[in-house]
Amino acid sequence: MKLDFKPLEIFNFDVLIIGSGGAGLRAAIEAKKFNSNLKVLVVSKGKTGYGNNTVVSEGYFNTLGFGDKKDSSEIFASDIMAAGRHINNPKLIKTFLNM
């Protein structure tokens, strides 16, 4: 049996990002903002913008209040804790919300 090998293709990039969910895409944007001449490659086994955690957090991490006068940082923090099933770090959430 004869094996046919294809020529090896070599790709050169400055930044390799594995995962095309929200965090991966955000990292790609920041890399290009840091230096627009950087060659950035994002690779993923899934659909772009639909990482495991991106889909879960989509409905929770939008914005505080959005015109609702009854909303507050405390209520938003509580919503984030509930979304994380209360295993997330409350101190980190307060830092995130600048409380």
Image: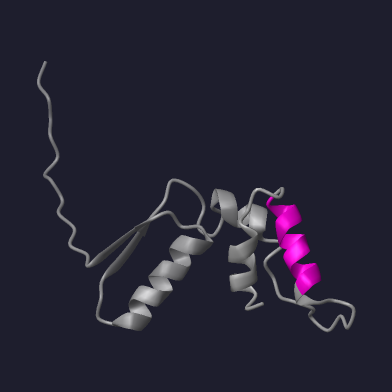
Q: Position of residue 35 (x, y in %)?
A: 29, 82
In the image shown, does 84 or 44 lie closer to the viewer?
A: 84
- Residue most extreme to the right: 70
Place of residue 72 in the rendered image (x, y in percent of width and height, measured from the top left): 80, 77
Left or right of 92 on screen, residue 70: right
Front-most of residues 25 and 53 = 53
Q: Is residue 47 left or right of residue 11?
A: right
Q: Residue at x 33, y 81 (%)?
A: 34
Q: Residue at x 17, y 62 (%)?
A: 12
Asked whether residue 45 is drawn in magenta, I would say no
| Residue projecting furthest to the top | 1
Q: Position of residue 14 (x, y in %)?
A: 22, 67
Please give the count of numbered marks on the rendered protein. Answer: 0
The front one of 7 and 74 is 74
Specify start and end residues of the magenta stretch as a single range.
Answer: 74-84
The x and y percentages for residue 65 are 79, 78
**Residue in the picture at 44% in, 61% down:** 24
